[in-house]
Amino acid sequence: MSLKHALLGFINYGPMTGYELKKFFDTSVAHFWNAELSQIYPALKAMESDGLVEMKVEVQDDRPNRKVYSITDSGRCELLEWLAKPADREQPREPILIKVFFGSSLSKRELIAVLRDCADETRAMLSYLEYAHQFVDKFVESLGLRQEGLFWQLTIGCGLKVHKAELEWAEEAIERIEAADDACFENEQHGYDGVIDIRTATEVLDRVKSLMPGALAGPDAYLHPAGDSTKEQLPNQPKTKVAAK
């Protein structure tokens, strides 16, 4: 997603200044898309050059002049065209999972502390989203925007489900690590090179990939065209042999 489409979406509600756009970002979509003023103003300037928005200066006697941006017909067409396209799924990056992946180099106590911190942050985010849910209800009721409220609440609902699942995972991970053998941790061999025979590991990896060609093919390999009802076998699933009677 490009920042310009989010800006076009907000400006499509009505003309706004860069400061007002930042305020709406922070109070509506910040839980899944953040933007700073240092990003917003250059984007608005580029969008004006491209004819997607128009800027008018509103003179104020007692305050600095306001630069107000409104969407053009071209900008609205750009927004609607982008909204109707399938959403691009970005590659996730989760620092907590990198820490867990290499967790055997830590002590059990250290790794549990990292996971408890993750769980605490996730609980805080859940509290924030639950409050945001109530905030949106009051906001849309005050402005008579019940139709928009449906879609805004859907994004908050997604955040709640995702973070509830993350919290469940963190709590389960803590339990499993607490029950794990202490010998699994503080593995000193991971502190220097040469522990793994890289050539052997590469050969094994290639052999496993040849047996399961779809295992590392990425999610796109599992997508089927819309309306395709055929149930093709997934690339990494071996064919089931029926035992002879």
Image (tube, helix red, strand yellow):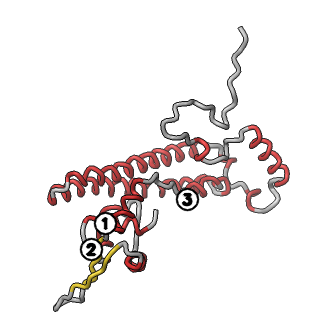
Most foreground residue, 225 or 157: 225
- Quarter of the image containing the C terminus? top right
Which quarter of the picture shows residue 234?
Answer: top right
Q: Please, what secondary structure does the residue beneath circle 3 have?
A: loop
User: Do the residues bearing badges 2 and 1 touch, measured as CB atoms within 8 Å?
Assistant: yes
The image position of residue 8, as x and y in percent, is: 35, 67
Q: Please, what secondary structure does the residue beneath circle 1 have?
A: helix
User: Do the residues bearing badges 3 and 1 touch, measured as CB atoms within 8 Å?
Assistant: no
- N-terminal of the two: label 3 or label 1? 1
Cα separation, mark 3 vs mark 2, equals 33 Å
12 w.r.t. 245: above or below: below
Residue topped by disc 3 = 93
Specify few, some or many for label 1: CA neighbours under 10 Å numbering under 14, 14-19, or 20 or more.
Answer: some
The image position of residue 7, as x and y in percent, is: 36, 68
The single residue placed furthest to the bottom in the displayed view is 61
Cα separation, mark 3 vs mark 1, equals 27 Å
Which quarter of the picture shows residue 32?
Answer: bottom left
Cα separation, mark 2 vs mark 1, equals 8 Å
Amino acid tagged 1 = Phe
How many numbered discs? 3
Residue displayed at 83% across by 48% down: 203
Residue topped by disc 1 = 10
Residue topped by disc 2 = 16
Residue displayed at 50% across by 48% down: 170
Mark closer to the observer (3, 1): 1
